[in-house]
Image: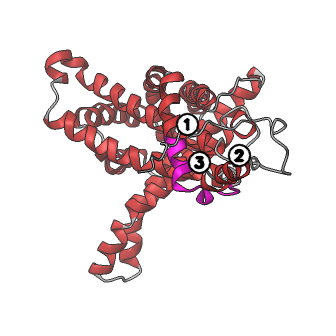
Amino acid sequence: MGTNQRKDENGARGRNASVPRQIPKSGWWDILLRVKDQISQDNVSIVAAGVAFYSILALFPALAATVSLYGLFTDSSDIQQQLSSLSSFLPQEAQTLIQEQLTSISTSGGSALSFGAIAGLLFSIWSASKGMAAIITSLNIAYNEEEKRSFIKVIGLALGLTLGGIIFVILTLFTITLLPSVLENLGFGQTMQTILSLGRWPLLGIIVMGGLAVLYRYAPCRNKPQWLWVSWGSGIATMLWIVGSSAFALYANDYSSYNQTYGSLGAAVILLMWFWLTAFIVMLGAEINSEMERQTRMDTTEGKPEPMGQREAYSADTLGKIAPQKASTNR
């Protein structure tokens, strides 16, 4: 009986899964139940609120850095029109707030590489990195890790991820805004241009998923997980973020009373709520990845396989509990 139970646990629950797709439905049920518990235990809602606060403080320095870098390649005043396509999923009040800030930034400075411009760019990136540092802390919480890296290393990681995120936004802008004109110059028919232009948005989803995978792999203080073991949480978080952002924009535009309640602060409150939703979903994706790793005994970390307890990653070194099975009754 004990052997049969052990075999059922290993096979039916995915305890020996070497890749996520080998985890069966019963194993995913275990994962989802543990994720539900971890959302409460890790105070994901409260932590996401802290990340949202630091993110909104970092937003305008990040916009300034993006405009400055963008201006090195093209007219920085064009970024307003191009960012409007990216911010279309935001509530209208939040879009207006960002557009006003972009107008102020793009008209107040040039793109020349003067000492002042370079100093301003570096200061903007440094300020924006505070939001990234908050995200790193939140992912450590989701992966049940303590921060053991030095202050310098954490700051360097935050700066690197921030700069990478800014470059990511710029490349995304080029992809979305230049693709239609490239297709037109290549001589594609109108129907094909329309089809390929619509393909920009699935491409954007793939880019967001890739960005989240990079965060989940490099931000937590642990031995890096294999790419396959961060891809599922990244994909689920991307889909939830797209749907959640669209639903929140619809609610804020048509049904909410933020402006009546908060007056001139309504736009800032709406933007803060959107950052909270985004941070919550990012942490949720990390919780899914963490509990997915805890479903298997196999080594999910990068490099040579190590036995449990020696992988330098809580999620890879521990097994999560399984959901109790309902006892069958004989009639």
Name the residue tied to disc 3: 213
Q: Which residue is mark 2?
A: 225
Residue at 69% x, 49% y is 1
Lateral position of residue 6 relative to residue 113, left or right: right
- Crowd rating for badge 1 (residues with CA inside 10 Å; few <14, some 14–19, many 20+): many
Question: Mark number for residue 85?
Answer: none
Q: Is residue 2 above or below residue 278?
A: below
Element on which disc 2 rests: loop
The residues bearing labels 1 and 2 have C-alpha atoms spaced at a distance of 14 Å
Earlier sequence position, callout 3 versus callout 1 = 3
Would residue 298 be found to the left or right of residue 92 on screen?
A: right
- Label 1: element kind: helix
Alpha carbon distance from label 3 to label 2: 10 Å
What secondary structure do most residues of the magenta stretch adopt? helix
Residue 321 x/y as whole percent? 61, 36
Choose between 230 and 173: the one closer to the eye.
Answer: 230
Camera sees residue 65 = yes
Q: Are marks 1 and 2 in contact (CB under 8 Å)?
A: no
Residue type, numbered disc 2: Pro
- Image point 66% across, 49% down: which residue? 5
Residue 198 x, y percent position in the rendering: 33, 66
Q: Which residues are magenta?
A: 17-32
Q: Amino acid at mark 1?
A: Glu
Could you tell me how far apart the alpha carbons at marks 3 and 1 are, in whole angstroms?
A: 13 Å
Give the mark nearer the N terminus: 3 vs 2: 3
**Magenta span contains residue 66:** no
Quadrant housing residue 46: top left
For the view shown, which residue lies furthest in the front direction? 331
> Is residue 71 visible from the viewing direction of this image?
no
Can you identify the residue that label 1 sits on?
287
Label whose residue precedes the other's in the sequence (1 or 2): 2
Name the front one of labels 3 and 2: 2
